[in-house]
Structures are given as structure tokens and as C-alpha cells.
Amino acid sequence: MVFKTLSEVSIKRKRMAEKETLYLTEFKHNVENQDIIKGLVILNELPEMLPDTRLKVLAVLQDSPESYYLLLLSEFFALKTDDLSQHPELVELTKENLRKRPEQANWFPSKTACTLLLQLLDEIEDEAKMADLILTLGEIEAIDAVNPLSEYLYSGSWILTKNSIHSLGQIGTKHAVLHLISRLGSDEKIDICILEALAKTGKQRAYKALTDYLGSPNASSRTRAKELLVDLGKLALPFLYENLTRSDPDILIHTLNVLGSIGDDQAAKPIRQFLVKSSGNANVRFAAYEALGYIKMPGGSFVLATGLEDEDIGVRTASAKAIDRNFDMILDQGIRNMLRAQDEASRELIKIFIDAEALKVVSALTDHPFFKKNALEYLEKHAHREIKQQFLPYLKEHLGENHPALQDLMVETEKPASKLTIWAVDDSRMILRMYRSMLHDLGYDSVNFEFPKQLCERIQSERPHIIFTDLNMPKITGIELAKFVRKTHSQEDLPIIMATTQTENEDHIEAVKAGINMIIKKPFTKKLLQESIDKVS
């Protein structure tokens, strides 16, 4: 009886050994033939194998072609998503490979990959590898990783913070967006990174956050938010319209700037309605009319003519340009009615249209005797050279090549040397036109720059006597411009005056630290420009 039992045990062991050998032989054959289905059968038997056999099977799997290895495991984990604990060896093998090559996670079911990557994040301490794992969680859009990823927003490490922002933006769920929004406001560099991530999410809550950020006290990140909103175009319009109901003048100005830069004709009606309600802030009114200068209005052009009677010269000039953009028979007749008095106010109106470079208006009104006489007189005797060059072809077309006034206009006359050369930089072309006209009237030579980068390049070989700069400009803010200039020119050597609509004290403090000599508020007048020039000269 005992001998029989021992014999049975021996037979059983022999059969088990044969079975274990068969597992290994069969799996090698599966790998050789790239057989996924039979390979899955063997992997499913791993828990039943002896430890030594499991290790040998795993070694064969590890040495198999990558394409087979990844496809086999992806199919296996797809079947075992909720039961990973039953296959610890496979889990560890996969984690080890993910540690070396996180991008392999794209092969696996998102839930499985997320679980394994998060386990690795808890286990490793190498910052570079952690950063790669965080990025991979975003690439696979691991929804279950949102809360763990949000903790890295406050890691204190720039690379981990940046990558967590990027990944949360890629995941883009409601909670991911909310985590990003809640991190805004403490650091300029982080804020810009978050704003860029929010703009890519396609989520309305993210777009709302971008428009809300227009009220930020930080010039650089606020400017970046404006650029991103312009890039979003029509997608941002509903939230920008909502901003027009706000009372903060800074937010209103930035919102109107963005609407003008987008240039969508749908924005005409909300801006027109905003103007009808009026604003006590001249800078806000200026921004509204300036925006309309880039938009075609389907109707309601009467509001543009109202701007010609504004108390502020800047608003009147912006209104003139908007009228030129939307010029029609109704506006034509309205302007002619305003010229009936043929008084000083009428002459000032003609000057405004010319300084605004309202080419359509000037061309249309050359048949008006009073307008023609005063326009030619202003162009010949008072207008800046650049304005003369802008209008000369149009006046030739309407008055004829041999008209005496045109012949006089084409004659270059020598003028007294300028007292100072002044550079002005502003991303608003309308503001630059005002600088050109006012500084010309004051007897100064001026050079205008629409982009700060142009000034930064030119100042390396030339030097003006004074620089006027805006604060909020794309790519390079007025504060950043001042820091650049101060690398080579002291405040005494080259005064910088900042003209801004911004009321935030934080911006003003940063401007002074950057080397700004003086801050003046828009809207400026010739008198204010002269007073500021006198103070810094």
C-alpha cells in the first residue's frame, strides 16, 4: 500500500514536471509564432505554475519582440483590469518596463496604465523620471490621475509643476480644469503655463477663466491671456461679451482690446450696446471705438458719429477711424451736417479725420468746398510728413495731378531742427497716430514702434532723447522693455515715460523698479505730453 502511494506521488510529480515543461515550451512556441490568443492562455495560467516556471515564462516574455510583448500584455490587462492583484509578477515586470520607457503605457488600457504609473510615482525619487511619468499620465488622458496630479501643482519643483499643468490640461475634465484655475494667482511663470494649458482644453469653464484673468494685476501673464483669447477667436466671444457687463475699467479696456484684435463682425452689436449705455471713463470709450475700427457694423452707425463729439481727443480720433471702417451714405451725410457751421470746431473735425488716416472719409468729402480747402491747408502746412505721404495719392486722384495745391503739397520745405527726438511704442495704432500728431504739433521728431521688439533692436545702434511706452503689449510688456533698455542706458541718460490705462498699483510699483522715470495716465493730451517731457528732460 505504501509503495503504491509513493508510486502515485512519483507519477503525479512527473506529470506536474511535464506540465510545467509544457507551459514553457508552449509559450516559447507562441512567442516564436506571434500567437496572441495562445499566449494569453499561458499567461492566464501563471498563478497555477510553480515559482521557477513562472520566472522562466516571464523571462521568455521579457525577451520577446517588443511588438508582441506589448500587444500580448495590452490584451491581457484588458481582460484583467479589475484583478491586477492576482498577477503580481506581470505587474512588476510591466512597471519595470514602464520605469524605463513610460511611453509604453499608451499600449495598455487607460485604467491599468494609470494604476501602474501612479504606483511608480509613489515608489521612485528621481525627479526626471517622475516628470516623464507625469507627462505620460496626461498623454493617456488618465482621468483617475487628476487628484494625484493636482498635488504636484504645489511640488516646489518647476519641472514637476509644469508637467502636471500640461497633463491636467490634456486630461481636460471639469475637475482637472478646476484644479488648474485654483492654482492661478501666485506666480507669473506658473500662471502663464496654466493659461496656455486652459486655452487648449476646449472647455467653456477654461475660457471663462481666461476672460476673468484680464483683471489680473500682473502685466506679463495678463498680456499672455489676451493673446490666447485672440487665438481662440469666436470661441472666446460669449465670455468676452459677458465681461462687458463688468464695472472694472481695466477689465473693460482689455476685453475691448481683445474684441478688436479678434475682429469678428458679430462683436459690433455688443460693443454698440455697451457704448449706448456709455462709460464715464474716457479710456474705456477709446477702447470701444478703437475696437469698432477693426469691425464691420451691420447697422447702428449713429453711435460712431456720437463719438466725434466726445470731450476727449483720443475718443474722437478713434471714432473717426471707426467711421472710416464703416463709412456709408448715412455717415457721409452726418459728417456734412456737422460741417455746416464752418467754424473752428468744423476745422478741428477735418484735422481729426486726417490724423486718424480716415482715407475713405477724406476721399468722399473732397467735393465739399469747406472740407477740401481746410484739408489741403492742414496737409500742406501742418500735417506730419507720414500723413502727407499717406494722403497724397488720394488727393491726386480727386483733385488732378496739376492742381496748384497738390503741387505745393509735394514741395519739401525745410523746417527748424527738432528740439528732441522721441520714440513711442504702443501696440495700438490709434495711440501711435496720436503720439505722432501731438509730438509733431509740439515740435518734436518722433519715431513710432508698434512692436517693442523693433525698438529693442533699434536702440542697440541709435538713441533717442526720451521713450514713451505702453504697459500692456504682446510678447514684451512696457516693464520688460524698460528692463532691457536699462541694461545699457541709465534713467538719467535716457528717460522712459510710461503711459497707461492701468490703475493697478502693483504694475506701477514694478514699473518704477524696472527703471521707468515717470508714469502718466491715458488719455493724454498735448499739454500732458509737454509737461512730462519737461519734467524728465
Image (cartoon, grey):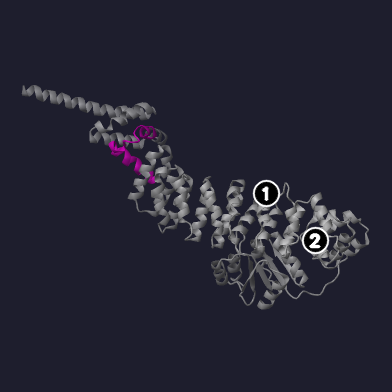
Which residue position holds label 2?
Answer: 354
Q: State whether residue 482 appears in this view.
A: yes
Kindly report the secondary structure that dominates the magenta region of the rendered protein. helix
Q: Is residue 438 left or right of residue 162?
A: right
Residue 256 inside the magenta-drawn segment: no
Q: Give x and y (percent) for residue 143.
A: 42, 43
Q: Is residue 287 left or right of residue 134?
A: right
Which amino acid type is marked by label 1?
Lys
Q: Quadrant of the N terminus?
A: top left
The residue under the point 84% across, 54% down is 363
> Counting other residues with Cα less than 10 Å from the Cα at mark 1, is it few (<14), some (14-19), or many (20 or more)?
some
Residue farthest to the front, as pictured: 277
Q: Which range of residues does the magenta coloring cover?
A: 73-100
In which image quadrant can residue 537 be found? bottom right
Residue closest to the eye, 380 or 503:
503
Q: In what element is the residue under mark 1?
A: helix
The label number, if any, that marks residue 269 in the structure image: 1
Q: Give x and y (percent) for residue 444.
A: 75, 72
